[in-house]
């Protein structure tokens, strides 16, 4: 961790590297013990450039960890029926511990039907209603990767989350809602804001922890940040000069926050790391080593 202005940077890249080293050692031991490596199947439909980059990064991460990846790169005109058939085959495969459908998918495909078709025990993205429900019931199984990664970053601060005032900006199924459930599980007091929220500034100003996941560049003004707060910026946006920025005005927020994640190098590396961790956990469950 390094200091910038008054805030300490929550270095997701460094934390991810440490976690992946530990996971790689565990994968090596499990592979030797059980005669096969954990397996992750990745389904990509179409040729969206950003999705291709994400999938390539996930495959590379698997290779570095000793996790076997099974690639299913399909044309954009693939039918929903074909995809459901493929998911059924992967559900039944003893070599596949995790199934990931890279989102977004083409408009003619219903992503919810694909997610719900995945065996909850192989849902390493943590999107299946069963796994979200387990988290809501305070009995987490496979957890949504980005919120799970955010919780690992919060652990790095050493703070006790019990009773902390938290604001989550954004109510998506991928980040906002499961993030709220994670923070509730940790004993925090949680507010979720969304496009209908009035006077967002007033909610952010009183928060001990701000999780920005609205997908709107610079939405959270630095002057809104409560002195000494922790800021987790999930947003990522590419500027005209090619640089990346988040949902938070970083420089101004860093003058007030105690802890803050950078963009890039904050939440992003942790999302893939928790995907790998979920795959290892699913493997251990399937081989009876959990």
Image (cartoon, rainbow, N blue to C red):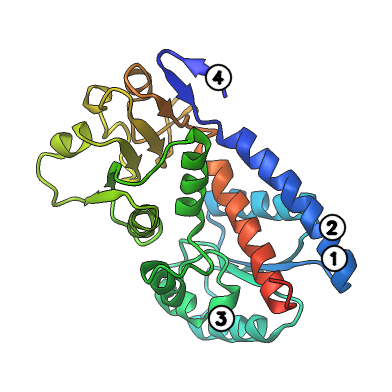
Return the residue nearer the eye: 180 or 146: 180
Q: Position of residue 130 (x, y in %)?
A: 44, 77
Q: Which mark is residue 28?
A: 2
Give the alpha-carbon distance from disc 1 to disc 4, as whole Å. Answer: 36 Å
Q: Which mark is residue 31?
A: 1
Q: Label 4: few (<14), some or many (≥20) within 10 Å?
A: few
Evaluate if marks 1 and 2 touch, with contact meaning CB atoms under 8 Å apart. Answer: yes
Which numbered disc flags the more N-terminal residue, 1 or 4? 4
In the rendered structure, the answer to whether residue 204 lies left or right of residue 100 reads left
Evaluate if marks 3 and 2 touch, with contact meaning CB atoms under 8 Å apart. Answer: no
User: At 33% across and 29% down in the image, what residue appears?
Assistant: 229
Evaluate if marks 4 and 3 touch, with contact meaning CB atoms under 8 Å apart. Answer: no
Q: Secondary structure at mark 3?
A: loop
Which numbered disc flags the more N-terminal residue, 4 or 3? 4
Give the alpha-carbon distance from disc 3 to disc 2, as whole Å. Answer: 25 Å
Give the alpha-carbon distance from disc 4 to disc 3, as whole Å. Answer: 41 Å
Query: Which label sits in the foreground, 3 or 2?
Result: 2
Give the alpha-carbon distance from disc 1 to disc 2, as whole Å. Answer: 5 Å
Query: Which label sits in the foreground, 3 or 1?
Result: 1
In the rendered structure, the answer to whether residue 141 lies left or right of residue 256 reads right
Residue 169, by quadrant, is: top left
Which numbered disc flags the more N-terminal residue, 2 or 4? 4
User: At 17% across and 39% down in the image, what residue appears?
Assistant: 203
User: At 65% across and 53% down in the image, what residue appears?
Assistant: 58
Q: Secondary structure at mark 4?
A: loop
Evaluate if marks 1 and 4 touch, with contact meaning CB atoms under 8 Å apart. Answer: no
In the rendered structure, the answer to whether residue 79 lies left or right of residue 225 reads right
Q: Which mark is residue 119?
A: 3
Return the residue nearer the eye: 261 or 81: 261
Which numbered disc flags the more N-terminal residue, 3 or 1? 1
- Which residue lies under the disc numbered 4? 2
């Amino acid at each position: 961790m390094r200091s910038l202005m008054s805030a300490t940077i929550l270095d997701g890249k460094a934390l991810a590297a440490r976690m992946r080293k530990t996971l790689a050692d565990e994968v090596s031991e499990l592979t030797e013990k059980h005669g096969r490596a954990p397996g992750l199947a990745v389904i990509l439909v179409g040729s969206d450039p950003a999705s291709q980059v994400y999938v390539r990064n996930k495959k590379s991460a698997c290779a570095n960890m000793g996790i076997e990846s099974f690639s299913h790169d399909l044309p954009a005109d693939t039918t929903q029926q074909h995809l459901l058939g493929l998911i059924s085959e992967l559900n039944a495969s003893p070599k596949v511990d995790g199934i990931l459908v890279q989102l977004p998918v083409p408009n003619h495909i219903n992503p919810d039907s694909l997610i719900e078709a995945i065996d909850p025990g192989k849902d390493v993205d943590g999107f299946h209603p069963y796994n979200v429900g387990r988290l809501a019931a305070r009995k987490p199984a496979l957890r949504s990767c980005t919120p799970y990664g955010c919780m690992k970053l919060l652990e790095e601060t050493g703070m006790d989350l019990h009773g902390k005032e938290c604001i989550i900006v954004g109510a998506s199924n991928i980040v906002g809602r499961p993030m709220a459930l994670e923070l509730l599980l940790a004993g925090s007091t949680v507010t979720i804001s969304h496009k209908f929220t009035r006077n967002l500034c007033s909610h952010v100003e009183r928060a001990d922890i701000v999780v920005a996941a609205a997908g709107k560049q610079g939405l959270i003004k630095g002057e809104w940040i409560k002195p000494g707060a922790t800021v987790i910026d999930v947003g990522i946006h590419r500027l005209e000069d090619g640089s990346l920025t988040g949902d938070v005005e970083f420089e101004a927020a860093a003058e007030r926050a105690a802890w803050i994640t950078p963009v890039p190098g904050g939440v992003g590396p942790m999302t893939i790391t928790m995907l790998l961790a979920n795959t290892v956990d699913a493997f251990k469950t399937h081989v009876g080593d959990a």
